[in-house]
Image (cartoon, grey):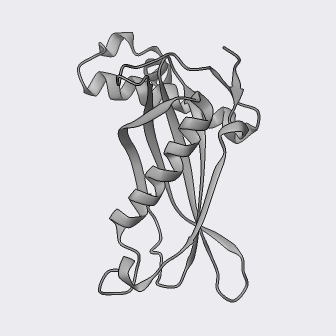
Amino acid sequence: MQPRTAFQSKTVVTDLVLPSETNPINNLFGGELLARMDRAASIAARRHSRRIVVTASVNHVAFNRSVPLGSVVTIEAKVSRAFTSSMEVYMDVWIEDRESGESIKANEAIYTFVAVDETGRPVKIPELIPETDLEKERYDAALRRKQLSLVLAGKMKPSDATELKALFE
């Protein structure tokens, strides 16, 4: 199985915020943004694994800036790290300034997907090779996030979380 780069999974989804997708103060519903991110991330995960993928978890979402009615929203998703059958997908959400056309980072999120076969059983996926400095940073951090998640779920002993321990030594 040939390793793949993060760039090979890159998915860009651009859409407009319509009135039916907004709350009473005319900002995009958080759940609507979550659904859009889930779709973009699933495409990125599928591009990396070339398999059916299912959402395993929403690890992190930061709603740093509201997304007003009429905004052009762009979600950029890339696989940040691949494990045995799971992969972490990191997303950046941008909104376009209506007057200048400049893109402003509004939100970010990290989802985890698992590649499965037709019966829903996890399958092995290619490893990921990060290329840029940002991809390398996110790649390294993904292992720490995975270990933290496993420790919190009781699936890993804290003493075995070597990447986490290294932060405190």
- Residue depicted at x 46% and y 59%: 36
Q: Check the image and name the residue furthest to the front.
A: 118
Vertical comparison of 62 with 163: above or below: below
- Residue depicted at x 66% and y 14%: 1
- Residue depicted at x 41% and y 53%: 61
Q: Quadrant of the rendered structure where residue 29 is? A: bottom left
The mark tally for this picture is: 0
The picture places residue 83, in percent across and down from the top left corner, at: 51, 20
Give left or right: position of 80 versus 63: right
Q: Quadrant of the rendered structure where residue 35 is? A: bottom left
The one of 19 and 28 positioned closer to us in this rendering:
19
Vertical comparison of 104 with 141: above or below: below
The one of 135 and 2 positioned closer to us in this rendering:
2
The picture places residue 67, in percent across and down from the top left corner, at: 47, 75
The one of 125 and 130 positioned closer to us in this rendering:
125
Vertical comparison of 151 with 97: above or below: above
Q: Check the image and name the residue furthest to the left.
A: 154
The picture places residue 84, in percent across and down from the top left corner, at: 49, 16
- Residue depicted at x 38% and y 41%: 59
Give left or right: position of 80 versus 88: right
